[in-house]
Amino acid sequence: MRLGTALPARSTTRSTRARLGAAALGVTLALGATACSGEDEPSDPDATAQATETAEPGPEVEAETATFQAPSGFELGEPSKKSPAVIATGPSGALVSLVEIEFPGEAPEIDRQQEIALDGLGEKFAAEDVVEVDGIEMWHVSGKESKGNYADVYGAVVDGTSVRLTIRLADAEYDEAERAAVNEQVLASWSWA
């Protein structure tokens, strides 16, 4: 079902749930820890394939929907009052955050989820290839933020929960190959609950 498509009268509840689901996905995006501004273009989407760097795993991050290892040098943090994100912080403002929000209704297709993510993050972010993480497809968008940070954002709706992973790394600390290696390390360690 495409969002915004008129449905017969008997499907009103389903249509309402779909709109609520899209709203929940939007709220998940709004609650993420990325402050999106800046003018730079995202880097080469094939950077992960070209990366020769490897990243060492750090502390294990446990959430309701998944467990993964943050990068080496990161420390587990506490969620803020503004966001229910499970976080780990690293050097120069680096951050790995996982936001989970209940998703009412039927989830849109992964491509539509990615479109909604891009709408929420703004034009400084670009769509990347969908990735399979521990057997589940996740959309992927990336972009440069104004404070010298580069963010890769991944998401999916899994078992009624909208899940959004943000990996934010400072340009001063991580070049393109190192960012790709960190992304690869975090996703390779990911295990759905």
Image: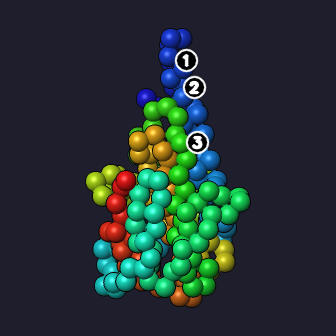
Q: In this view, does 93 lie to the left or right of 189?
A: right
Looking at the picture, how far across and down is residue 136, in whole percent? Answer: 33, 51
Q: Check disc 2 and give the amino acid type.
A: Thr
Q: Earlier in the sequence, mark 3 or mark 2?
A: 2
Whichever of labels 3 and 1 marks the residue nearer the N terminus, that label is 1
According to the image, label 2 marks what residue? 16
- Judge the density around disc 1: few (<14), some (14-19), many (≥20) Cα neighbours within 10 Å: few
Q: Where is residue 140 in the image (x, y as percent from the top left)?
A: 44, 59
Asked whether disc 1 touches disc 2, contact meaning CB atoms under 8 Å apart, the reply is yes
At 28% from the left edge and 54% from the top edge, which residue is drawn? 135
Q: Are the two marked residues, 3 and 1, in contact with CB atoms closer than 8 angstroms?
A: no
* Amino acid at circle 3: Ala
Q: What residue is pinned by disc 3?
A: 24
Dot 3 crowding, Cα within 10 Å, few <14, some 14–19, many 20+: many
Instruction: Provide the residue designation for mark 1.
Output: 12
Which percent across, then down, holds residue 173? Answer: 53, 88
- Left or right of residue 7: residue 69: left
Q: Residue furthest right?
A: 81
Q: Vertical placement of 110 versus 21: above or below?
A: below
| Residue closest to the far bottom | 172
| Relative image position of residue 128 (x, y in whole percent) | 42, 61
Q: Quadrant of residue 17?
A: top right
Q: Residue at x 51, y 80 (%)?
A: 74
